[in-house]
Image (cartoon, grey):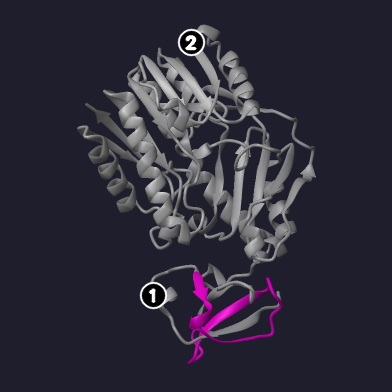
Amino acid sequence: MNTGLCIVKKQNFYKNRHLWIFSGAIKTVKDVHPGGIVDVVSVDGKFLGRGYYNPASDIRVRMLSFRKERIDREFFKKRIINANLLRERFLENTNVYRVVYSDSDLLPGLIVDRYADYLVVQFQTLGMDKMKHMIIDALNQVFRPEGIYERNDVQVRSREKLPLLRGTISGKEPPDLVQVQENGVKFLVDVKRGHKTGFYIDQRENRKKVRELSPSRVLNLYSYTGGFGVYACLGGGEVVNVDTSKEALELAKENFKLNGIPSHKHREVLAKAEDVMRERWNGDMIILDPPNLALKRKDREQGIKKFTSLNANAIHSLGQGLLFTFSCSGNIHTEDFKRAIFHSGQKVGKELILLELTGHPFDHPVRVYSPELEYLKGALLYVR
């Protein structure tokens, strides 16, 4: 294995066990092509680790290991096996989950999601993209999937000067809809065209919580393909699903049918959440799971303002009952999230009781040295 050399003048990343080395910490880089592997050393020659290099990114090097180990197919196979073993310890009646979550599994820039017999992958960085074939070989050895589909259509690739791609890269092409099981609940997922890699896998435990709460009548805003709504009905309630995508709502209907839920228990409304919240909700729960409101750091303040407004509208519409509200933006931090909820209740003049804060499920772990991976925040509130 040919490796280049990266000499760093600052070692904060090493002290903090962080995987990112920014351009300002580097003294010089030698003998490496963009996306290639480098040995990272201090100015006095001490070996600090091994990672991959991209001169076009502010994050010049992303670390793969703090040890001198060969970066090859066996390296990726071992990392993937370890990541999957962690997940399998907690899985029950579930064949849809995140196998690899980037830095948290010491594989920065790589996402691998399992959908029953298929894998969906994202190579978000140049370095990972350069090693794509080794990673695909390792995944085939570990999982023997029917097929592996790439959803490399995420904008983060543009920042790495990578093309946006989508398609089958190994084995059979997935069907238009893949049937999966989550906590024993069945869903049909469009892994080729759906949001993210097809399904909001990260909301699994929060969906389960809705079922356990057994609300009687639920308004499910930004419902997508009905995930929260299906669980609400299985908990004995009725649900109104609201989304601006006709295709998503049609697939939601199929998901209710797949789980034996009669049509009178759910209703699908093609509308904007803001429009629906103008009316008083005659029920005991609202679920508010909007899209990312601050995609970029510069959008943070505007995103917080929008999140506050949405929650104020939901609180006003609900009157009294449970509000389960979420932010999926990494740029809106936990304190921002809590402060926005405070201001939304203050704005409407209602009492808010925080029953529980929720976040990532175990298959989206947040490595304590890489807090940037924390994005999902949830709050279960009682409004009165």
- Magenta range is 20-47
Q: Which residue is drawn at 40% across and 20% down?
A: 218
Q: Residue at x 72, y 54 (%)?
A: 164
Q: Decide: few, some or many residues near mark 1? Use Cα within 10 Å; few <14, some 14-19, many ≥20.
A: few
In this picture, residue 199 sits left or right of residue 369: right
Q: Which of 92 and 338 is in front in this view?
A: 338
Residue 331 shows in the view: no
Q: Please tell me whether residue 74 belongs to the stretch shown in magenta.
A: no
Q: Nearer the viewer, residue 364 or 191?
A: 191
**What's under tag 2, amino acid-wise?**
Lys
In this picture, residue 45 sits left or right of residue 317: right
- Residue 69 at what x, y percent from top left? 59, 70
- On the image, which quarter does residue 249 sit in? top right
Task: Name the front one of labels 2 and 1.
Answer: 2
Q: In this view, does 193 lie above or below 105?
A: above
The label shown at residue 253 is: none
Q: Which residue is drawn at 26% across and 35% down?
A: 348
Q: Which of marks 2 and 1 is nearer the N terminus?
A: 1
The answer to whether marks 2 and 1 mark residues whose Cβ atoms lie closer than 8 Å is no
The label shown at residue 15 is: 1
**What's under tag 1, amino acid-wise?**
Lys
The residue carrying mark 2 is 265
